[in-house]
Amino acid sequence: MSKAEAADEIGKMSFEEALAELKGIVERLEQGDGKLEESIDIYQRGALLKQHCDSKLRAAQERIEKITLTKDGQPAGSEPLDLE
């Protein structure tokens, strides 16, 4: 599978699917049982999965809004969440 095909496949994954696969890759690499070339290939896939997860998290953070309340506790509206 080419890098572009892998990126397309990963791009269709949910955050949870990508994270689960990334965890599996980390476990495989930590065991150190594979051949060098295979380890390099799965490491590269892991890097793509990490990038995808980071992107999904950033998109979710941008959608989060902070709800503002009036003095009596009623919702007054919302504003973008200040992450800094």
Image (cartoon, rainbow, N blue to C red):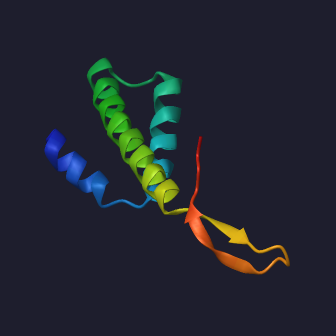
Q: In the image, is 10 to the left or to the right of 69? A: left
Q: In the image, is 59 to the left or to the right of 76? A: left
**The furthest residue to the right:** 72
Which residue is drawn at the image coordinates 22% and 47% (left, top)?
A: 6
Which quadrant would residue 77 be assigned to in this image?
Answer: bottom right
Q: Is residue 1 visible?
A: no
Up-down relation of residue 61 to residue 67 (above or below): above
Which residue is drawn at the image coordinates 43% and 47% (left, top)?
A: 53
Of 47 and 57, the residue lying toward us = 57
Which residue is drawn at the image coordinates 52% and 55% (left, top)?
A: 61
Looking at the figure, which quarter contains the C terminus? top right
Of 18 and 56, the residue lying toward us = 56
Of 24 and 15, the residue lying toward us = 15
**The furthest residue to the front:** 71
Which quadrant would residue 48 be assigned to in this image?
Answer: top left
Which residue is drawn at the image coordinates 82% and 77% (left, top)?
A: 73
Q: In the image, is 7 to the left or to the right of 17? A: left
Give x and y (percent) for residue 72.
Answer: 85, 78
Give x and y (percent) for residue 25.
Answer: 45, 37
Q: In the image, is 3 to the left or to the right of 47? A: left
